[in-house]
Image: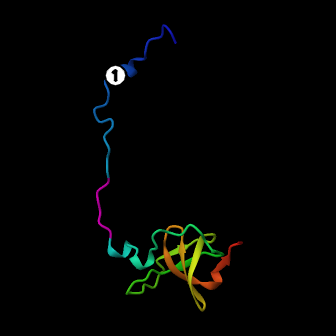
Amino acid sequence: MAGRTRPRDEEAEPDPGAGTMLRPEAAILADETLIPRTNLVRPPPNRFTHELAVDEPYRLDRRERAGEPDGVLSAGTRVAVLVEDGERCRVVDGSGLYVEVRRTSLRELAK
């Protein structure tokens, strides 16, 4: 508005620390946090054949098998079935994660 003066606090000197970016301390993650190359498909698919009907735990292809799953694909995740083997299937999701799931956890997408 015309004729108004600035409040005194707006006339203060700029903060010398303004614009400084603080970064966390760098840390090196353990090898177990990496996804093995055998569990990645590049580029990831852009067409899918099925979706998961239920949350499905998976394990990555590692030499040592842990008791706990490495992760869970959520119900509704769209996947492309690449290998069918009895009660199990190898699928890849939209991020390129290639894992084995139970065939009964899959629902075929409409064509």
| Residue 10, picture quadrant | top left
| Residue 76, picture quadrant | bottom right
Q: Secondary structure at mark 1?
A: loop
Q: Nearer the viewer, residue 97 or 63?
A: 97
Residue that carries the numbered disc 1 in the rendered image = 12
Residue at horizontal 67%, vertical 77%?
107
Q: Which residues are magenta?
A: 24-29
Residue at horizontal 48%, vertical 10%?
4
Q: Residue furthest top?
A: 3
Q: Is residue 27 magenta?
A: yes
User: Could you say where residue 105 lies in the image, as x and y percent from the top left?
Assistant: 63, 80
**Mark 1: few/some/many CA within 10 Å (<14, 14-19, 20+):** few
Q: Nearer the viewer, residue 99 or 110?
A: 110
Residue at horizontal 42%, vertical 84%?
66
Q: Is residue 37 magenta?
A: no
Name the quadrant of the C terminus: bottom right
Q: Residue furthest bottom?
A: 86
Q: Nearer the viewer, residue 8 or 88?
A: 88
